[in-house]
Image (cartoon, rainbow, N blue to C red):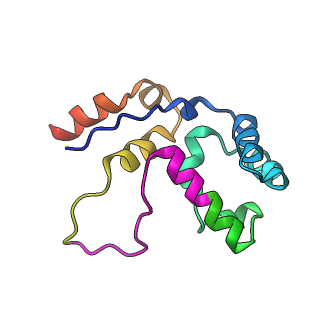
Amino acid sequence: MATYTGAMEFLDWSCHDVARWMESLGYPEYTECFTDNFITGRKLIFVNCRYLPRMGITDFKDMQVIAAHVRILLGTSEEPWSRDLGLSPRDPVITFLEVKSRTGRRADALTYQRFLSDSSE
């Protein structure tokens, strides 16, 4: 099973922290898109080319670059738009981040190691 060694401090980012990160990437014109849509570090898992236009980001090249930076930050790879049922299971980091994107005590307390041990049972 895969192990994730990257830091996940971004999970604690507020929408203003995410906006500052976008500005540091060279996209200050989009900081308001992230704050207006309440995109926190936990919600970054959903920031991809499919959802960026809904947030007001429509320049295709910018969308590609932003989505790539989000994947780098999350430590994930791009999910194929269509998956064959015969493929191996999804990347556990992506599944973990989807669970962590929720709010509540269970999501707050969940660690990656705990997620892996719960998944293997």
- Can residue 14 be found in the magenta stretch? no
Residue 75, x across and y down, in percent: 44, 46
Residue 33 location, x and y as percent?
78, 53
Residues 104 and 89: in front is 89
> Which part of the image, by quadrant, shows the N terminus?
top left
Q: Residue at x 58, y 47 (%)?
A: 44
Residue most toward the left? 121
Q: Is residue 82 magenta?
A: yes
Q: Position of residue 81 (x, y in %)?
A: 43, 73
Examine the image and state in which quarter residue 84 appears: bottom left
Direction from residue 6 to residue 118 in the image, left or right = left
Quadrant holding the C terminus:
top left
Is residue 105 shown left or right of residue 87? right
In the rendered structure, the answer to whether residue 53 lies left or right of residue 36 reads left
Vertical placement of residue 4 versus 37, above or below: above
Quarter occupied by residue 52: bottom right
Q: Residue at x 22, y 40 (%)?
A: 119
Instruction: Give the residue at x 42% y 23%.
Output: 109
67 lies left or right of 15 = left
Give the extent of the magenta segment: 67-85
Q: Please name the residue shown 35% across and 32% down the image.
A: 112
- In the rendered image of this protein, does residue 63 appear above or below residue 102? below
**Relative to residue 69, is residue 62 depicted above or below?**
below
